């Protein structure tokens, strides 16, 4: 029996765990892959207060993990397959074990949105800039998406690749001004506006790409057998298993204490209804959820 179980070890989950543990609670974090969540996969962590210059998602995640373990937080790498949220005692079933707790914090964020196009599973598609970027040194890469996350990775890849093509559905980049200003300083970055990647061709790896102009419907085929495709088309909240909760656009509504409509169940980070999804807001969500879950657990004694 735990006081608090947290599903997800991204910034929200780790923040919640550290704050919950500081209140003297027995805390368990369940994580499917590795500490860090989506932020652990980015090339650079930007704008977070006092972040180290040039901090990668990987090093940021490692420091998060170290902090949690030093605080005495228990982390288990298991896949959650079922939850029971209602009732005094919450239950979580994983692919390895079954757990119970007085309170539960849902902080398992989101997953990268699929394009749902032919060839998306070919080798060289849905790459990670930090992990795979050097494999495309001197080659062409295509970044799918024009928002902050996509353009930030495009800027990182511009120092590696021969050419970076940013493909965005909007008329112009939808990122912050800082990133727009940096894009124009790179001669090897090009923008393909109001366009979508609609098909990828090849036997095992990418051989050609099909782009569609969203204004005219005109298609063009680009043959580029050595290119890499980096997809940043937004995220989908990982809420499919939480059938006991009412969702809003796939996200979980919470109150000011991060508590859902079910007493003792909290949600924090990208998984909840919110306007701003940044590391800073995820950490804040986690802090509130961890403190409030600890207090709620004491009420239920």
Image: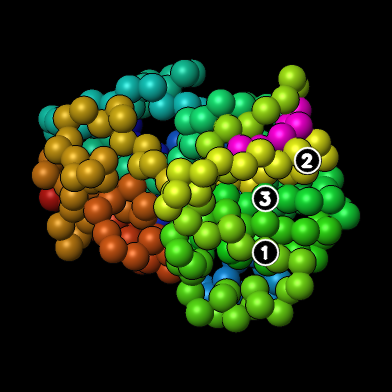
Quadrant of the drawing holding the N terminus: top left
Structural crowding at the residue carrying mark 1, measured as other residues with C-alpha within 10 Å and reported as few (<14), some (14–19) or many (≥20)? some
Which quarter of the figure has residue 209?
Answer: top right
Please give the residue where the numbered disc 1 appears in the rendered image.
190
Q: Give left or right: position of 33 versus 272.
A: right
Q: Residue at x 64, y 73 (%)?
A: 183
Q: Give left or right: position of 132 versus 29.
A: right
Is residue 11 one of those drawn in magenta? no
Structural crowding at the residue carrying mark 2, measured as other residues with C-alpha within 10 Å and reported as few (<14), some (14–19) or many (≥20)? some
The span shown in magenta is: 205-210
Query: Mark 3 and mark 1 in contact (Cβ < 8 Å)?
Result: no
Please give the residue where the numbered disc 3 appears in the rendered image.
142
Q: Residue at x 61, y 27 (%)?
A: 119
Alpha carbon separation for disc pair 3 and 2? 10 Å
Q: Give left or right: position of 66 versus 12.
A: right
Of the residues under marks 2 and 1, which one precedes in the sequence? 1
Please tell me whether residue 48 is drawn above or below residue 42 in the rendered image. below
Quadrant of the drawing holding the C terminus: top left
Alpha carbon separation for disc pair 2 and 1? 16 Å
Provide the secondary structure element on which disc 2 rests.
loop
Provide the secondary structure element on which disc 1 rests.
strand
Please give the residue where the numbered disc 2 appears in the rendered image.
224
């Amino acid at each position: 029996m735990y006081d608090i179980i947290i599903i997800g070890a991204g910034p929200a989950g780790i923040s919640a765990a550290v704050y919950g543990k500081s209140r003297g609670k027995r805390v368990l974090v369940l994580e499917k892959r590795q500490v860090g969540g989506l932020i652990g996969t980015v090339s650079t962590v930007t704008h977070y207060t006092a972040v180290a210059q040039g901090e990668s998602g990987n090093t940021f995640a490692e420091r998060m993990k170290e902090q949690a373990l030093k605080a005495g937080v228990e982390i288990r790498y298991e896949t959650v397959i079922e939850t029971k949220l209602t009732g005094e005692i919450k239950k979580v079933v994983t692919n390895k074990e079954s757990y119970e707790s007085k309170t539960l914090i849902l902080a398992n964020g989101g997953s990268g949105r699929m394009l749902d196009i032919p060839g998306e599973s070919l080798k060289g598609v849905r790459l990670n800039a930090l992990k795979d970027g050097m494999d495309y040194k001197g080659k062409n890469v295509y970044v799918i998406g024009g928002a902050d996350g996509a353009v930030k990775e495009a800027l990182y890849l511009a120092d590696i690749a021969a050419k970076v093509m940013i493909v965005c559905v909007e008329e112009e980049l939808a990122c912050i001004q800082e990133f727009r200003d940096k894009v124009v300083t790179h001669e090897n970055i090009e923008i393909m506006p109001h366009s979508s990647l609609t098909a990828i061709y090849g036997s095992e790896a990418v051989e050609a790409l099909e782009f569609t102009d969203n204004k005219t419907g005109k298609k063009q085929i680009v043959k580029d057998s050595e290119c890499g495709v980096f997809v940043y088309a937004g995220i989908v909240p990982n809420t499919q298993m939480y059938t006991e909760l009412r969702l809003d656009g796939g996200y979980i509504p919470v109150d000011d204490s991060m508590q859902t409509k079910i007493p003792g169940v909290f949600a924090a980070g990208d998984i909840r209804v919110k306007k701003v999804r940044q590391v800073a807001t995820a950490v804040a969500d986690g802090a509130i959820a961890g403190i409030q879950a600890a207090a709620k657990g004491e009420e239920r004694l």
